[in-house]
């Protein structure tokens, strides 16, 4: 195993693992930022830094890197790369070299994002980069623009690659109704990426042009408009939530179905109602991020209805997940615990989003810790738990070895408890008025003990995540050999050896007429 | 002018479409909600709608969680080679399991939307008898201008019992005038005028804080709404008016000591 082979690899599995390593490194850095922020907030007034700009830079890095450097690349980079060709019985992706280019670009983007700490004026504009502040700050807005453009481009070429792969490279006999739910979910996510990433690219390019080249897209004194940026930004960034949500719920479907040895309940409802519904609605709900931004009243009311209607596809998926558990045969392995954790925590995250769909209710809670708690339940907890569930689930396949069950479960329970302590408390004080993005909460002394509780919870959460990552590293080096199909799953990726060789199967697989990725057989 | 007309027509049509979509369900909500008295204070309407929605989502959440927990604990694997034994769905039941949940979720959605819409109209329709104050926000202060030209900074002094309308703009970055006690906020920004109103009923003090990231000192950008009784407010306003008149006409008042710097601070 030499480094050059890995860097210049065109094998989809190795590209996937490169994505995994890069995104976990990004996760670690962004997680440390979160701990720094929690440390700062543990007392009123300056705690570990007297300069609010430091806090704002941590907050920017935490948000931007978690979303653009960890979640999207882990889900649409690692899982999509590793699983999709194996699940559809293909030798590789349609354009292996383009695939290699996308992982290189991803590394350039991540390195650019992390260089934040080595330049004199790091960006302090939050991951949203709203003008006018982003065009007048001394912070380096260009760095933000280029990071987003490069990561976005990496994602677009990944999307083209996977849509082509699934369209043309399925093994004989794998019809559209026999695709894994994860494959469908990822296709939905890539369709959204292809439609909406260009809009984000436009938005972040325009703020840098405003700041450095003297254009006036967002300067009302010279004929621009401030709100235009927010519309462009959320026109992408709300669908981005589904770009994360769809693959992560797809992973949860795979894990729950495999470890419960039970067919996905009402498969077509999930594919056409759930995934289809989300792809259709994704682009019509962005205004709910602008309920207090001064948008036209009729637009706020119209998108209240579409936003609430998101509950329909998401609800159908939840019904299917719960239905899959009915009369199943559950093994409480570590990946299964994480996946069941997602079902419960996503329930909290999803339901607490309903009040946020109603503009009149957001007048009080918008831009408070309630919103932060809500979207951390959805993204940080449910999203990250499903990434962890997926890594544990496919760990035997991509490493050929087994992780340690005991430490896996210890890590799960620590993260489960820690995340509830942090994010439940967050929603609680948010309803009472604690605004987000505050370096100091001198005006809210009543929340100090709640902040200290959250800091303690964040430490528990961090320890839990660290245990999981150590478990993988140790397991990959000296875990016991896992065998080809430790979970007894009929899904195609388990029919080849672990880890799969270049080309995946010595002879291309073909499937029987009654085969289905979720047809579990006693044996 | 023509363009303006077309825009107006489009806006009216869309409002009508959105409105009539909701009107039907708002009628249903109205029937179910008839016990609620006519809201005078949107903040109280917020409290009751928030409470209702939180109760609803708690019930749905507990229902889902209990069913899931029951399925999980009744489905533990007992033998290594065991597989799930869930029944296969017939085509009819598959359709049923799709259509019925869609119908249930959609009715919950429309019911919530209708209630939210009613409260929204209340938040956006400002009573005619009101105190109208202009707000210019900036890094990092709230500058208020009363109709008679009196200015204050970071202290919005209002009489109890009269709705207060703020017409807001910003001289630099985005800010959001958030009064947690009155359950209301709205962003202010350069180049546009936004508004919010609230209804102070009793004398007292309420925190105003910035809820939109506006720069380095964002978390320190705060002020107060000070609600005085009508008499105290009138007395205060009279005093301010006198001072303002004195500052505007130093020569006539015969006080050469009054220098232009006594004019209300403008930054």
Image: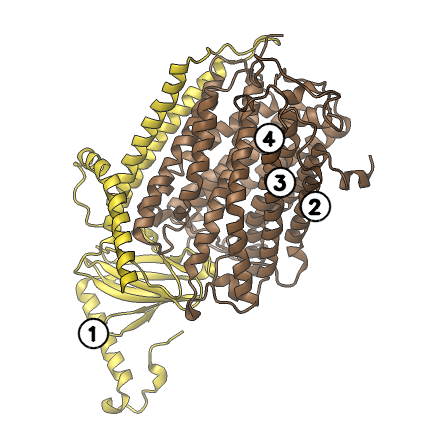
Write down the residue under mark 3.
A158
Identify the colour scheme used: by chain
Circle nearer the N terminus (2, 4):
2
Q: CA distance from mark 3 to mark 1?
A: 68 Å
Vertical order, B86 against A271 (above or below): above
Circle nearer the N terminus (3, 4):
3
- Name chain A's colour: brown
Instruction: Describe the element under mark 1 as helix, strand or loop.
Output: helix
Q: Residue B99: where, in percent of width, then height?
A: 35, 23
The answer to whether residue A442 is visible is no
Vertical order, A79 against A518 (above or below): below
Q: CA distance from mark 3 to mark 4?
A: 12 Å
Q: CA distance from mark 1 to mark 4?
A: 76 Å
Q: CA distance from mark 3 to mark 2?
A: 12 Å
Query: Disc 3 is attached to a residue of which chain?
Result: A
Q: Residue B197: where, in percent of width, then height?
A: 26, 57
Write down the residue under mark 1.
B238
Query: Disc 4 is attached to a residue of which chain?
Result: A
Vertical order, A497 against B132 (above or below): above
Tell which of A87 and A359 is nearer to you: A87
Q: Residue A179: where, in percent of width, then height?
A: 56, 24
Q: Which mark is residue A104?
A: 2
Q: CA distance from mark 1 to mark 2?
A: 70 Å
Query: Disc 1 is attached to a residue of which chain?
Result: B
Instruction: Describe the element under mark 4 as helix, strand or loop.
Output: helix
> On the same chain: label 1 and label 4?
no
Write down the residue under mark 4.
A166
């Amino acid at each position: 195993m030499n480094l050059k082979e890995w860097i210049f690899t065109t094998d989809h599995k190795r590209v996937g693992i490169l994505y995994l390593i890069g995104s976990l490194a990004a996760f670690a850095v962004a997680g440390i930022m979160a701990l720094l922020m929690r440390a700062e907030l543990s007392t009123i007034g300056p705690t570990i830094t007297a300069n609010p700009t430091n806090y704002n830079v941590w907050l920017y890095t935490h948000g931007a890197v978690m979303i653009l450097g960890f979640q999207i690349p882990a889900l649409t980079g690692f899982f999509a790369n590793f699983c999709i060709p194996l699940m559809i019985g293909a030798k590789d992706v349609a354009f292996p070299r383009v695939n290699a280019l996308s992982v290189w670009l991803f590394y350039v983007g991540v390195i650019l994002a992390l260089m934040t700490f080595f330049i004199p004026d790091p960006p302090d504009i939050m991951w949203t980069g709203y003008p006018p502040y982003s065009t007048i700050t001394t912070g380096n807005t260009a760095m933000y623009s280029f990071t987003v453009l490069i990561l976005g481009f990496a994602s677009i070429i990944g999307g083209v690659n996977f849509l082509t792969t699934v369209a043309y490279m399925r093994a004989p006999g794998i019809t559209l109704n026999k695709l894994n739910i994860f494959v469908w979910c990822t296709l939905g996510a890539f369709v959204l990426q292809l439609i909406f990433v260009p809009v984000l690219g436009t938005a972040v390019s325009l703020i840098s042009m405003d700041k450095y080249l003297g254009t006036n897209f967002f300067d009302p004194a010279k004929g621009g408009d401030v709100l235009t940026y927010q519309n462009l930004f959320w026109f992408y960034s709300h669908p981005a939530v589904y770009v994360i949500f769809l693959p992560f719920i797809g992973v949860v479907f795979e894990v729950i179905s495999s470890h419960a040895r039970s067919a996905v309940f009402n498969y077509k409802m999930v594919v056409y109602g759930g995934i289809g519904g989300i792809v259709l609605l994704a682009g019509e709900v962005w205004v709910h991020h602008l309920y207090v931004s001064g948008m036209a009243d009729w637009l706020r009311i119209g998108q209240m209805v579409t936003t609430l209607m998101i509950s329909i596809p998401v609800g159908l998926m939840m019904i299917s997940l719960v239905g899959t558990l009915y009369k199943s045969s559950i093994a409480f392995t570590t990946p299964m615990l994480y996946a069941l954790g997602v079902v419960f925590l996503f329930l909290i995250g999803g339901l607490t989003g309903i009040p946020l769909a109603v503009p009149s209710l957001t007048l009080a809670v918008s831009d408070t810790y309630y919103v932060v708690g809500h979207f951390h339940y959805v993204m940080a907890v449910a999203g990250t738990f499903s990434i962890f569930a997926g890594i544990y689930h496919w760990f035997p396949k991509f490493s050929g070895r087994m992780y340690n069950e005991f430490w896996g479960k210890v890590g799960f329970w620590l993260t489960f408890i820690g995340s509830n302590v942090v994010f439940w408390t967050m929603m609680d004080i948010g309803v009472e008025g604690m605004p987000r993005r505050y370096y100091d909460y001198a005006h809210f002394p009543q929340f100090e003990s709640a902040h200290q509780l959250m800091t303690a919870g964040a430490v528990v959460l961090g320890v839990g995540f660290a245990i999981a990552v150590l478990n993988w590293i140790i397991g990959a080096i000296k875990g016991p050999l896992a065998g080809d199909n430790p979970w007894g799953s009929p899904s195609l990726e388990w029919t080849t050896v672990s880890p799969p060789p270049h080309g995946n199967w010595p002879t291309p697989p073909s499937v029987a007429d009654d085969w289905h990725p979720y047809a579990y057989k006693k044996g | 002018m023509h363009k303006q007309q077309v825009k107006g027509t489009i806006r009216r049509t869309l409002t009508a479409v959105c409105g009539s979509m909701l009107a039907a369900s708002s009628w249903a909500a109205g029937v179910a909600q008839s016990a609620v008295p006519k809201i005078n204070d949107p903040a109280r309407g917020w409290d009751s709608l928030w409470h209702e929605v939180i109760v609803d989502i708690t019930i749905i959440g507990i229902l889902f969680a209990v069913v899931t927990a029951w399925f999980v604990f009744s489905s533990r694997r007992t033998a290594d080679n065991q597989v799930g034994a869930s029944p296969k769905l017939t085509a009819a039941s598959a359709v049923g399991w799709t259509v019925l949940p869609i119908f249930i979720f959609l009715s919950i959605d429309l019911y919530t939307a209708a209630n939210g819409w009613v409260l929204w109209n209340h938040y956006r329709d400002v009573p005619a008898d009101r105190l109208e104050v202009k707000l210019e926000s900036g890094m990092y202060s709230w500058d208020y201008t009363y109709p008679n030209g009196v200015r204050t900074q970071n202290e919005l002094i209002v009489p109890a019992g009269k709705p207060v309308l703020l017409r807001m703009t910003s001289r630099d970055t985005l800010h959001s005038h958030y009064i947690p006690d009155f359950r209301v906020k709205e962003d202010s920004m350069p180049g546009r005028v936004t508004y919010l109103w609230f209804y102070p009923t009793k004398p007292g003090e309420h925190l105003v804080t910035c809820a939109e990231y506006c720069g380095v000192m964002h978390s320190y950008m705060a002020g107060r709404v000070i609600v005085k009784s009508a008499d105290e407010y009138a007395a205060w306003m009279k005093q301010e008016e006198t001072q303002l008149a004195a500052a505007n006409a130093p020569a006539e008042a015969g006080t050469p000591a009054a220098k232009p710097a006594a004019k209300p601070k403008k930054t």
